[in-house]
Amino acid sequence: MKYVIIGGDAAGMSAAMQIVRAKQNHDITVLERGEIYSYGQCGLPYTISGIVDEPEDVIARSVETFRNKYGINAKINHNVTNVDQDNKEVHGTITTTGEPFKYEYDKLLIASGASPVNPNWDGIDLSGIFHVKTIPDTKDILSYLKKDVKNVTIVGGGYIGLEMAENFKEIGKNVTIIQRGHQLMSPFDSDMAKLIHNEAEKQNINVVFGESVTGFSGIEKVEKVITDQNEYPTDLAIVSIGIKPNTQFLNDEFEFGEIGELIVNEYMQTNVKDVYAAGDCASQFNKVKQKNDYVPLGTHANKQGMIAGQNLAGESVTFKGMTGTSILKFLDLQIGRTGLSEKEANDLSLNYDSVTITTRPVAGYYSDEETLTVKLVFEKETKHLLGGQIIGHKGVDKRIDVLATALFHNMTTVALLDLDLSYAPPFNGVWDPIQQAAKRTL
């Protein structure tokens, strides 16, 4: 059996390792257009502040390890340009030489990931303008920071934008975030986003709302960010306005979602025979929405890759779905969410309600220094939990994971009161904050 995998990062190598473990004699070829395998992209912002020493520290396994220890034909600089599903062939070009290549497969996994959106703005090619997606991206930023960089402008107020803002602030840079909309972190409801805005203001990060970037100006290197309303002097700019699935090399016989992600079933199969997909190039089934969604996170990529690999190796394993759980550190705040926001519930025409409380993450008499704001979204009549958002100074991770588990098992807010959650004054009150919020739904 010839296995070909397009993409050598989280989903692709999770799948490859499942085949290695299941098949004593395996024939696995991985085609990676870059030169680095299996690395943790989410750790890259923290190399800016030095919390992570070097960009290479986020590499889980080297190319040589996959080749020499596991017997995988791990290729680098192999850019796939076409999949011929009729003849079961993958075609492409070696980026360093321009030489074409062709590999035949019996089963194919597309784990090609996603790339940052690169808008066609004036001056986008000036020196000093960066994306944050790969280890080479990060090394380029670190090298550029050796120059006289005082002012940093971040275009986009999502996860990467806020993480980069924090880490630039940590090394003493003046940071401006330009957000086209009217709130940071658009997956959150506006009332919760205000807590994030307050933190940015408190920490002297300048946030500009309601302006659209149209270009950059400068002589050879970036000197200004131009919006539809103003100009902002800058020494370095980060463009972080979203990602797009790397599926442009596939023909229209494949089924795609709204932004180009491959639609897969619970076995990670595409609509094309013997072709699977996983990770940031694929859809994920949302258990709360009960439909396919696109929430590209490392957790989903590794899980989908593992399941795809098991099925490629002949097992029958299903992806049970996700609830869209994520967490972020932004300066002194922890920011977590899972399930649906009010906006999403409204878009789905659900009969929902919500409660929001601000309380303490520990027993009040133990410490009154930190706060925790908990928002629950739930069905009005049945009290079924639909989602949760939590922002505070500590303990967000503990609570958001409880809510994610509750969502996965279709629990009600009433059932949250029955949970036997841990209690000791340094960690919690006798009623956990999510239970305090759940009481308000009765």
Image: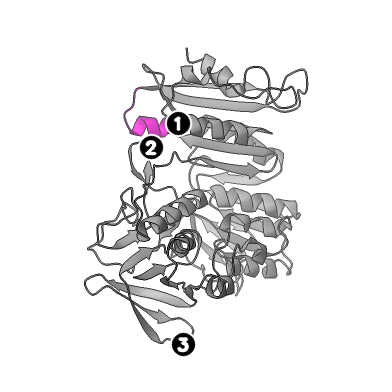
| Residue 68 % position (x, y) | 56, 75
Q: Which mark is residue 287?
A: 2
Q: Is residue 258 above or below residue 62?
A: above
Q: Range of the magenta residues?
A: 342-351
Q: Is residue 279 magenta?
A: no
> Within 10 angstroms of label 1, few (less than 14), some, or many (20 or more) residues?
many
Residue 346 belongs to magenta span: yes
Residue 106 position in % (x across, y down): 30, 70
Checking the image for residue 407, the label placed there is 1
Q: Earlier in the sequence, mark 3 or mark 1?
A: 3
Name the foreground residue: 75 vs 387: 75
Q: CA distance from mark 3 to mark 2?
A: 45 Å
In this view, which residue lies farthest toward the top? 442
Counting from the top left corner in percent of width and height, residue 181 is at: 48, 43
Q: Categorize mark 2 by other alpha carbons within 10 Å: few (<14), some (14-19), many (20+).
A: some
* Left or right of 156 on screen, residue 47: right
Q: On screen, 83 above or below 21?
A: below
**Callouts 2 and 1 close, C-beta under 8 Å:** yes
Local SS, label 3: loop
Q: Which mark is residue 97?
A: 3
Q: Is residue 73 visible?
A: yes
What secondary structure is found at the residue carrying circle 2? loop
